[in-house]
Amino acid sequence: IPTGITASIQDERSQHKNRAKALKLIAARVSAKLRAEENEKRGAMRSEAMGGGNRSERIRTYNFPQDRCTDHRCKVSEYGLDNLMGSGGSSLVDTFLPHMQQMRRDEMLRELEENE
């Protein structure tokens, strides 16, 4: 496998011993490189799955002074936090589910149009 990793050792008098040491060193360097690439892939997948925790990655904002709840995924704001949070009216799921379903349908239609 051409990796571009080289090693030259002149510790021993014997060419065979120097070559054996160099091959061990190259094997160690290649395995370290492969481990680093695997760790980098795993880290990228982990950060993609978890997100960075930035403020821009929020799902909902509850604004109590304005009595408003905003779902940032579907960009819908609903007023009346007491009804949304309490048992008196509709729940958060019932309120935002139709918007999320419509958003998912739109995404699926876009994907179908792109594939055609």
Image (spheres, rainbow, N blue to C red):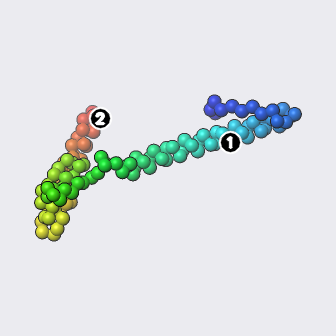
Of residues 69 and 21, the one nearer the viewer is: 69
What's the residue type where badge 2 is placed? Asn
Q: Which disc is residue 115 wearing? A: 2
Q: Residue furthest right?
A: 13
Q: Residue at x 30, y 46 (%)?
A: 56
Quarter of the image with the C terminus is top left
Q: Is residue 60 left or right of residue 79?
A: right
Query: Badges 1 and 2: C-beta atoms under 8 Å apart?
Result: no
Quarter of the image with the N terminus is top right
Position of residue 95 relative to residue 115, above or below, is below
- Residue 44 coordinates in the image, percent (x, y): 45, 44
Of residues 1 and 74, the one nearer the viewer is: 74
Q: Residue furthest bottom?
A: 87
Q: Which disc is residue 101 wearing? A: none
The residue identified by callout 1 is 28
Quadrant in the picture for residue 6: top right
Mark 2 crowd level (few <14, some 14–19, many ≥20, 10 Å Cα): few
What's the residue type where badge 1 is placed? Ala
Kindly state the secondary structure of the residue where label 1 is placed. Answer: helix
* Sequence-earlier tag: 1 or 2: 1
